[in-house]
Image (cartoon, coloured by chain):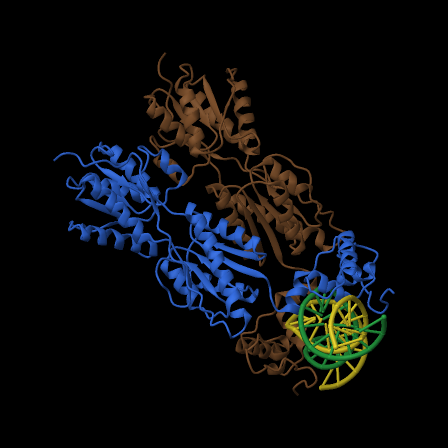
Chain colours: A brown, B blue, C yellow, D green
Amino acid sequence: MATDASGSAGTAAGEASVPTMFDVARLAGVSHQTVSRVLNGRADVAEATRARVQQAIADLHYTPSPAARAMASRRSRSLGLILAGRPDYGPSSAALEFNQAAYAAGYTVSQVSMRSLQRSALREAVRRLVAQRVEAIVLISGEREAVEVVGSVDVRVPVVAVASEPVSGVRRVAIDQAAGARAAVEHLVGLGHREIRHVAGPHRWMDATERVRGWREAMASHGLRVAPPIEGEWLPDSGYAAGVELAADATATAVFVGNDQMALGLLHALRDAGRRVPDDLSVVGFDDEPEAAHFAPPLTTLRQDFDALGRDTMSLVAELLAGPGASASQPASVDDPAPRAPSLIVRASTAPPPRA
Amino acid sequence: MATDASGSAGTAAGEASVPTMFDVARLAGVSHQTVSRVLNGRADVAEATRARVQQAIADLHYTPSPAARAMASRRSRSLGLILAGRPDYGPSSAALEFNQAAYAAGYTVSQVSMRSLQRSALREAVRRLVAQRVEAIVLISGEREAVEVVGSVDVRVPVVAVASEPVSGVRRVAIDQAAGARAAVEHLVGLGHREIRHVAGPHRWMDATERVRGWREAMASHGLRVAPPIEGEWLPDSGYAAGVELAADATATAVFVGNDQMALGLLHALRDAGRRVPDDLSVVGFDDEPEAAHFAPPLTTLRQDFDALGRDTMSLVAELLAGPGASASQPASVDDPAPRAPSLIVRASTAPPPRA
DNA sequence: GCCGCCTGAACGTTGTTGGGA
DNA sequence: TTCCCAACAACGTTCAGGCGG
């Protein structure tokens, strides 16, 4: 009954090596092929046999070798995730949620992180991921150039990026940054503000550009004067610098700041300059990081749902992988998901402008 | 000259499939085995042959299949990283740096992230990583239980965790939390404070426990009264709650807070209660997250070098993998690295106590 | 007899038959 | 028949041997 010629894995003297299908097959009294069918849930296996095999698998603590499986099936069941940039609240959250979704979907994600964007390093990372035979590549990085570089490498797998502007060679998932900016302006205009400044992130970031665009559009739609935005680097220090500049500007009554970190620095500068928020000047941030509710004063800001963003990313990857895989029948016509709009969180940093 | 019986990979009609060693061998006019030696940098290959093979590799854009390589060599060249907990500044930074170091060392890291700690989910993650044949498992999570759970699963690979207390079954890398707490107290005592309170993190976190211990020790060494610590949940909100409590305590002149986020909430509560910092009360934080320098007032805090922590983690993994691998000659006597001490960053939230 | 190269056999799976109750 | 299962051949590497110059 025991298969004879096959059972080679004869557990040598030294290390108790990892059991193989053959070990399971021998223990269950079937062929290795039957074990394979049980593992892959194929239909034609007798219930009794299936149970016997399962038992043997459990007894031996057998787990199939992903390497062998990948080789034979020509599928790695793994995804590549590139994280380029500072480990900020937003990207970290999105990456976490993406990882979780990928894990739930049975994929392994091999992640490569880099603190700064260097074209060659980024290209190299993509190539390495492709060499690892990942089935798709995901990029989380706000910098336009990063997305362009990754999109420009010739890979034979889907590339998905978190990006608020279209980029060739890349499928996108995004949050509607311009809508958030518009909401900020509408809120301030509703309070009676007319001189609304903007402290932007670096223009090489797509989100920064989009927020500027939304701010401009909303200002124009109300016929308001659009002063040139002040550009910062996302960090509190550059927010401080912008605050120094704005404290000297007697005409401004409100500021829409590109993110919460800069808003924090800006509040600091205004405090140092003796300008009161929101009495003298209203401030709106962007992101709603956990700290924002406790700034001085608590910050009115736009919350981005980074968790949903991460999940959307995995959903798109899954569709892309399912679509063209079936055959040529499916035209792989998967659309990028619609961007979600940020939601306005009103706190104490905004109020009607001071009476002139 | 061309090998005949072997060159099977005959590029079928449809998809241009990935080239194999045989394709390279055929193009270079050598055997597949010679290609392998070139790839692995073996000695006995003539220089001219080597060059020819390299050329063929480049021409075909050949990259070896990691699956096949793993199967034949019985090494996956991959590491497992588990991230359990909120995506805070510290863990995110350490993970980023670890990833980078692993990448530089030629390892693939397959990362699984989970927002909260559930024993079964954590065990499952470990098992899945083991099933993937990772060569080591790294855990980044401050919660004691997480480390214990991961350490308790019977895996046949090294397990390394970021942990400030010893845990069985786990190699450790850490920052000296108690030393940081002592430094905080010394700083405050040096300013003349005697009634120094502590707002701790949840005691299920090792770091929280260690900071309490350091605070106690330092207080005792100065013969100071040790009031029971207030326990929070690391978040700004719980810092606010602690602040409310402390604002009512007329005897306290200084607070050492378990992390910067809670310190922020605490500052907020004190402000709301009309207590001035540092005039009425001094505040010290922990972590030095990027925001801390712009709190109101800028926060005196203890900086942890999370980047170094991440690198140390990878270094330990590398040693562990190199050690026992060679043979039984090396007793695998690799020590855990010495914990690094946090450094005190003095800002505006601390000052001498008000004159009584 | 030493270098340089090749042949043959694993490694542990998944497809694809074809044959036995 | 209608299921179920076994044998055989990939998949793309690395590792022992061996055989020419």
Residue B241 x %, y % = 27, 42
Residue shown at 30%/44% (left/top)?
B238
Q: Does residue B276 appear anywhere in the picture?
A: yes
Residue B313 vs residue A29: left or right?
left
Most foreground residue, A299 or B36: B36
Q: In the rendered image of this protein, does residue B153 appear above or below residue A9?
A: above
Quadrant where the image shows the C terminus of chain B: top left
Residue B36 x %, y % = 72, 64
Most foreground residue, B85 or B222: B222
Q: Tally the marks.
A: 0
Residue shown at 48%/38% (left/top)?
A304
Residue shown at 67%/60% (left/top)?
A75
Most foreground residue, B3 or A42: B3
Q: In the rendered image of this protein, does residue A341 appear above or below residue A51?
A: above
> Looking at this rendering, what residue extends furthest in the top direction?
A356
Residue shown at 36%/33% (left/top)?
B294
Give residue B4's quadrant in the image: bottom right
Residue B152 vs residue B194: left or right?
right
